[in-house]
Structures are given as C-alpha cells and as structure tokens.
Image (cartoon, rainbow, N blue to C red):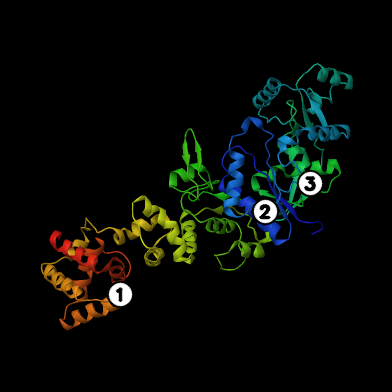
C-alpha cells in the first residue's frame, strides 16, 4: 500500500442504522486494524430534509455496543474536523467554483418543470431523457448563456445548480479490489448535480472533497454505490487528486426469495434488522441488543456475510477477525441472511460465558418475580440449563421449576403415571426421607440401588419422578434437580403429584 491506511464509515442520520450499514462499518474497522490504520466516522448530513433527530446518537451508540467505535469522529480526535458535513458546508462552494473554472462543471438554470417537460417529451418518442453531452448545449445553462447573462441571473437571485461536465467518448477502466476491472462508457453517464441552489453540496461533491481532505486511502462501501464510481473517479481526476482504492461490498440478501434485506423482512419473519431498538410514533423496531444477542455474536455473524478466511472456522473473536480479514476474500455475490444461524452464533457465545456472568444477567428477571437466591446456587442452575438456550431471556422458561413447584402437568407426559405409580412414589419419598446427604451423586446411588434390589424398571420410577418435580418430561439430570431444590421440596412435590395425578 502506497499510503497509510485511513478508512471511513460515513452514514447519513436519516433513521436507525441498518444491519447492512453495520457490516460496512465492521469491514472498514477490520481493514484498518489489519493494516495498523485509522477507522474514522463522518456524519453526512447535507440533506437536511431527511435528517431525523436521534439518528446520529443512535449510530454512535450502536458502534460502541458492538465494540467497533471509530478512533476519529465528532468530538473525538478531530484531526481533520469538523466530522459533520453540515459544519463544513462553507468550504464546498470553493470546490464547486474550482470545477467551473477548470471547465469540468457548469451552472444550470433548468427548472424542475422544464426538466419534467423534457422527460415527458422523450418518453412520448420512446426515449429516455438524460442530462448529458447529448443535450446539455440545448438546455438552460452556462454553456448556452453568455458569461454576462449567467452572472446577471445569479445576481437576480434565480435558482441554479452546478452540474459536472462528464467527458465524451471515453471508456473508463476502473479497478475494484473485490470485483476486479470494471468498464464504464462516459457517453452513458449523466451530468450529476454537484451543488444545489440552497447552498449545499450533493453527496457526490461533499463525499469526494471530504475523502480527499481527510486523506482517505480506501473507500469500502456497499455495492449500491457502484454506479457512482465513474463520477467519483472523474471528480478526483478533475481536481488533480489521487483517488483512493475502492471496494464495493456485496448486498445482504433476504432469507427467502431475492432482493436486499429490508425491515419488512424482519417484521414478517420476527428478527431484527437494526443493532439497537428504534422508537417512532408508528411503533418500536426491535434491535439485536434488546433481543438478547451478545455484541460478539452479532459481529461474528456479520463478518461471515460475504467473507470468510478460506477455512471451515466459524467462531472468531474481534481480534481474530482483524488478523484474518482480507478484502480479496470478500465475495462478489450477495450473502443470504440466515436468522436461525444468527441464533446459533449467539448460543455458541452464551455457552462459553462463565456461569457467574450468566447468573448476573439472569438475576434481574428473577428479582422482577420476587425471587431471591444464593449466587452460587443460581450459577449451578445456569450451568445445567445454558446448553439448551440461545438467549438469557430463555433461562426462566428452562428453569422455572427450580424456583416454583409445578401446578400443572403435561398431559402427554401424564400418561406415564400408571395405576401402580402412586404406591411406587410413596415408597420413594419414604426412602428419600431417610437420606441425610442429599447430594446428586449420593441420592442417585441410593435410589438406583433401591430400584435394582426391588427389580423396579427405570422408566416406572424416573419418568413419574421427573413429572412430579418438573411438571413435564424435560430438564437436566434429575438428581441434579433434586439436589438444588432440596430434600424437603423434592418430597413435597412428589406428595403433590400423588394427590393430583
């Protein structure tokens, strides 16, 4: 690499950060870490009509939660500040004027009504109207008005825009790190608006100027920006600047069908498409954080959407991802989003966490139910159920019988309660009453010896016993349950089952 790596994530604060945007931020972060470079964040808020209050704060909070905060951004190491485009607006006029002076841009006075009329006229003749070399010298702009007339119209307060003057009869051979060489015919490009009559630049001008001034070495962004690539490269050339290297990431696709993943897909299938919850007057859109996902799991599954390290490995820490990340291993094709696989990732991270950490995460749910329990005992319960959970939020459903005796019994499981079962259960609780050491291993030994001596089949005792203690044929090792709820509670539940079943 010819210059120090500086990459950026440049979202617009127009709403919550989509999971596709999060992946773009993540890939930029990993690329910077891999090459010892800088990952910075710039807020692109030049379109004030689409600005949404709270969206900027949401972006920062989401990246911080995921552990991929930028090293330079608004209010933090502002080496090339400001990092909000709306606070840089006074500088863009100068660059628009520079392009006009060099003949690479021109002023256009065409009204929306006039342009609409041209479009309709072309459509009536089976053509598509494009504002470019085909017709720009027939339209209302500084190419068809004298310099004096242009100045006079500007002075009178007439609305105008600045358009880029796209070169004619040229084939651009551009390189993309992911896609290789891509060709663009300049005759098919339109003369994009760079500067608007409200004194604000469009995305294209502000983006190029800022990337240059902030010394961006690589632009890593979604493939929806691929059609803008020729304009951006031409703008660099027009300014006489060295262009960064470009890499356009594949789309994240719907789980079912074709097309880009949308909020509607998440609403329909019951999974989030935003990192954090987002509230509006219309309602609440769920987030991965509020759904109980660990940030490490979200980072892991996002990294593998369109990239892999060439191995079968699936679980990576953030540090491992940074060491392994390579843009040359990013796929060109879109990556299917798999909500079930994402839950699998969360499960993998859940089971590697300590029982004590998971207990602390589970404890607030118990407090809400008025349940107080010794920390070491709770950790033991968590150790028995966590293998069955994808989320901490599932712990209560998996463990409620440790805290509350069953009041209902699963109907299918109750079929295991035979005519001879009450007598066997009565003999069993009398056996249990005489056990002093109620540890799992000791109780298991005594009960199994009793069954062997009396030639009682395992199923005749163990299934009714589980039904008595749990209310269903589910749960971890039965004698572990007995140890944790204790002798008194065990016998009480057996008696209750005899009375009710």
Q: Nearer the viewer, residue 95 or 175?
A: 95
Closer to the camera: disc 3 or disc 1?
A: 1
Q: Nearer the viewer, mark 2 or mark 3?
A: 2
Q: How far from the left and from the top, in percent, is residue 54?
A: 58, 37
Real-space Cα distance between discs 2 and 3?
A: 26 Å
The earlier-in-sequence mark between 1 and 2 is 2
| Residue 85 spot, x, y in % from top left | 72, 38
Q: Give me the disc on residue 439.
A: 1
Residue marked by disc 2: 28
Front residue of 392/324: it is: 392
- Upstream in the sequence, badge 3 or badge 1? 3
| Mark 3 lies on residue | 172
Q: Is residue 346 above or below residue 479?
A: above
Residue at image x 77%, y 38%? 187
**How far, Cα to Cα, is label 3 from label 1?**
77 Å
Is 88 positioned to the left or the right of 429 in the image?
right
Label 1 neighbour load within 10 Å: few <14, some 14-19, many 20+? some
Q: Judge by depth and name the residue closer to the eye, 454 or 223.
A: 454
Q: Are marks 3 and 1 in contact (CB under 8 Å)?
A: no
Q: Residue at x 70, y 57 (%)?
A: 32
Where is the N terminus found, in terms of image quarters?
A: bottom right
Look at the picture and state if 402 lies above or below 205.
below
């Amino acid at each position: 690499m010819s210059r120090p790596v500086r990459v950026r994530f440049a979202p617009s604060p127009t709403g919550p950060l989509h999971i596709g945007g999060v992946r773009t931020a993540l890939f930029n972060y990993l690329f910077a870490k891999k090459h010892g470079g800088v990952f910075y964040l710039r807020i692109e808020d030049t379109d004030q009509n689409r600005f949404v209050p709270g969206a900027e704060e949401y972006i920062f909070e989401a990246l911080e939660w995921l552990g991929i905060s930028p090293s330079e951004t608004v209010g933090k190491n502002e080496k090339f500040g400001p990092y909000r485009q709306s606070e840089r607006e006074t500088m863009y006029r100068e660059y628009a004027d520079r392009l006009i002076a060099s003949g690479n841009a021109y002023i256009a006075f065409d009204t929306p009504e006039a342009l609409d009329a041209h479009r309709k006229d072309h459509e009536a003749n089976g053509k598509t109207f494009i504002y470019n070399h085909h017709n720009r010298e027939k339209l209302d702009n500084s190419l068809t008005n004298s310099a004096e007339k242009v100045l006079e119209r500007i002075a009178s307060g007439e609305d105008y825009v600045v358009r880029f003057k796209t070169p004619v009869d040229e084939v651009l051979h551009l390189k993309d790190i992911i896609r290789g060489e891509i060709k663009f015919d300049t005759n098919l490009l339109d003369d994009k608006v760079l500067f608007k009559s409200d004194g604000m630049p469009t995305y294209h001008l502000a983006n190029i100027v800022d990337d240059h001034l902030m010394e961006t070495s690589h632009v890593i962004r979604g493939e929806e920006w691929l059609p803008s690539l020729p304009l951006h490269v031409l703008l660099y050339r027009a300014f006489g600047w060295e262009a960064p290297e470009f890499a356009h990431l594949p789309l994240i696709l719907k789980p079912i069908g074709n097309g880009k993943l949308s909020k509607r897909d998440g609403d329909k299938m019951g999974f989030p498409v935003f990192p954090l919850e987002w509230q509006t007057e219309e309602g609440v859109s769920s987030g991965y954080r509020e759904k109980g996902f660990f940030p490490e799991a979200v980072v892991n599954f996002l990294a593998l959407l369109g990239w892999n390290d060439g191995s079968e490995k699936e679980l990576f820490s953030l540090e491992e991802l940074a060491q392994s990340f390579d843009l040359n291993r990013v796929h060109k094709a879109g990556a299917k989003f798999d909500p079930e696989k994402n839950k699998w990732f969360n499960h993998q991270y859940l089971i590697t966490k300590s029982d004590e950490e998971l207990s602390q995460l589970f404890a607030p749910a118990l407090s809400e139910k008025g349940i107080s329990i010794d920390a070491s005992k709770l950790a033991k319960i968590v150790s028995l159920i966590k293998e069955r959970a994808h989320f901490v939020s599932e712990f209560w459903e998996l463990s409620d019988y440790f805290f509350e005796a069953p009041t209902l019994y699963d109907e299918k499981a109750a079929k295991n309660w035979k005519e001879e079962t009450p007598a066997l259960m009565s003999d069993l609780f009398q056996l249990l009453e005489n056990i002093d050491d109620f540890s799992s291993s000791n109780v298991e030994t005594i009960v199994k010896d009793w069954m062997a001596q009396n030639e009682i089949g395992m199923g005749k005792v163990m299934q009714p016993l589980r039904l008595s203690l749990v209310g269903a044929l589910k749960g971890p090792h039965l004698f572990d349950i007995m140890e944790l709820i204790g002798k008194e509670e065990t016998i009480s539940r057996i008696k209750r089952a005899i009375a009710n079943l």
